[in-house]
Image (cartoon, helix red, strand yellow):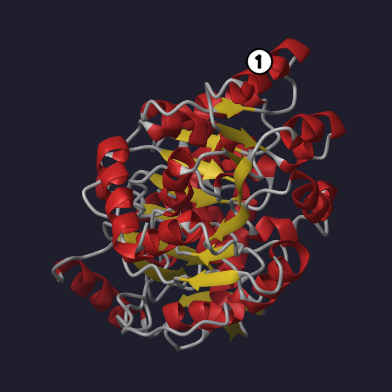
Amino acid sequence: MNKFETEEVINRNASEIFKIDYLRPYQLLITSALLEEDNRQNLLAVLPTGSGKSLCFMLPAVMLEGITVIVYPLLSLMSDQEKRFRKLSIPCTLLKGGQSKEERNEVFRKLYRKEAKILITNVEMLNQHRIRNNLKRMKISLLVLDEAHTVIAWGNSFRPAYRSIKEVCDELRPGRIVAFTATSDRKCTEELKETVLGNDALVIFGGSNRSNIIYHRVKTLFPLLDIIHILSSPASRPALVFCQSRELTQQLASRLSPFFRTYHYHAGLDKDIRSEIENSFYSDREAVMVSTCAYGMGVDKSDIRTVIHYSLPQTAADYLQESGRAGRDGKTSHAYAFLGNSFHESQLEELFSKNECIRENLIKAMGQAVDEECTGCDVCNRTDHIPQGAVETYRQLRLPYLYKKDTLIRKLLHKEPFTILSEREIAEGISRMLKYNMIISRFNRLRRGKTIAKDSGYGRMEKNINQEKTNEGYQPSV
């Protein structure tokens, strides 16, 4: 087939099988490249989240003669992909840990008899000799590595099986290897070519910019109050809150539960419980999920309106990957980065603190360029968000009274909305306000101690708050 005949067949299959009226330019380009018979180049596709990269290998998998092996880094992604194929009535089979001998024999029986031509699995399964020996007897047209940046990031740390991926590919000899990711900087791209794809691999680069996501920064004082305020409107949900520890996901979800329908999610949960949570959150249009990065890759809930980073990850790639869970349906969504609240140092603190376009700096950190104007960030929109804790603290302070720090803490403990916070959290918040000069410390000779007074800018700040509320298209200030 020539180019035009190939595109015609691709579009017909997309319409008949996937009920899609048209393919996006990158989808058509990648699908066409994978169906070429004369060119057997391996391929790396770097596409932003929400761009429909799954279709780029689902469509060729249906059209190619041999089987397609799709390798995922997480069980949740494997299950999610299996659901997509079944929903489309496309036969597939799943190979994972914990299966009995009979279950695995049934997997290979389906593949041998061509009752299924798509195998979903993970790298640990492919590292088993018996499994590789069975697969070598079949014609593998395509081997797909989804979330391919994990091959590099995890192969050097807690997933040593990824170090053998090149050996696995050499032994299985697939017709073509294709790797997909939303976040691959220049260094990761070169390492993927060197270790898996080959230096002559074709790289299709769609960039990491998500124009429908508006980026915000919050110099948080009392994180719990900011989360509640940001998510107070039903239009801001469903929402996803990322934390750095499993314990914190459970604690935070519990503390948010009086205000929202909440779930918590991390890799330490039993797989059946994780599956139940995924299904519940998937169908819930107003819930809040508190999660570690385990929910940050590929899980396809398209209508998430808000992503909050309670603490920042280490790299721009991780942030774009996780914030990219928002707005996969293409609608305007919001991503909030809490500053000064990370357990570990993050280079992103400085990036978000600069008075420069947040979007452009994130994309630059990926070694990419932004070819269009910013479609929304706090710097470009000149949005000066006021932490909700500052707003509430100012409401409790009345001149000419001055408060010692301990006195102010005790006062706030009994005032709404601070009653949901511990004394330690209030003390930490007041210390941050002092550090950021949101309130000032004065020396009172008569009392021989430091006292707290309202910042002279309070009147201006109160005016800004009222102005924000009257602006058209008002977003909750934080």
How far across and down, in percent of the image, does residue 462 sit? 28, 74
Q: Evaluate whether residue 473 shows in this view.
A: yes
Q: Residues within 10 Å of mark 1 (few under 14, many from 20)?
A: few
Q: Quadrant of residue 425?
A: bottom right
Q: Is residue 354 above or below residue 82?
A: below
Q: Where, quadrant-wise, is the C terminus in this rendering?
A: bottom left
Q: Nearer the viewer, residue 125 or 295?
A: 125
Q: Is residue 230 above or below residue 385?
A: above
Q: Evaluate whether residue 226 shows in this view.
A: no
How far across and down, in percent of the image, does residue 277 sit? 51, 29
Residue 284 in the figure: left or right of residue 152? left
Q: Where, quadrant-wise, is the N terminus in this rendering?
A: bottom left
Q: Residue at x 64, y 26 (%)?
A: 271
How far across and down, in percent of the image, does residue 320 sit? 51, 65
Q: Nearer the viewer, residue 80 or 121?
A: 121
Q: Quadrant of residue 13?
A: top left
Q: Nearer the viewer, residue 132 or 304?
A: 132
Residue 347 in the figure: left or right of residue 366? right
Q: Quadrant of residue 268?
A: top right
Residue 459 in the figure: left or right of residue 97? left
Q: What is the residue that sits farthest to the bottom in this orientation? A: 355
As helix, strand or loop, the secondary structure at mark 1 comes to helix
Question: What residue is shown with label 1?
Answer: 106
Q: Residue at x 67, y 25 (%)?
A: 270
- Amino acid at circle 1: Glu
How far across and down, in percent of the image, does residue 274 sit? 58, 29
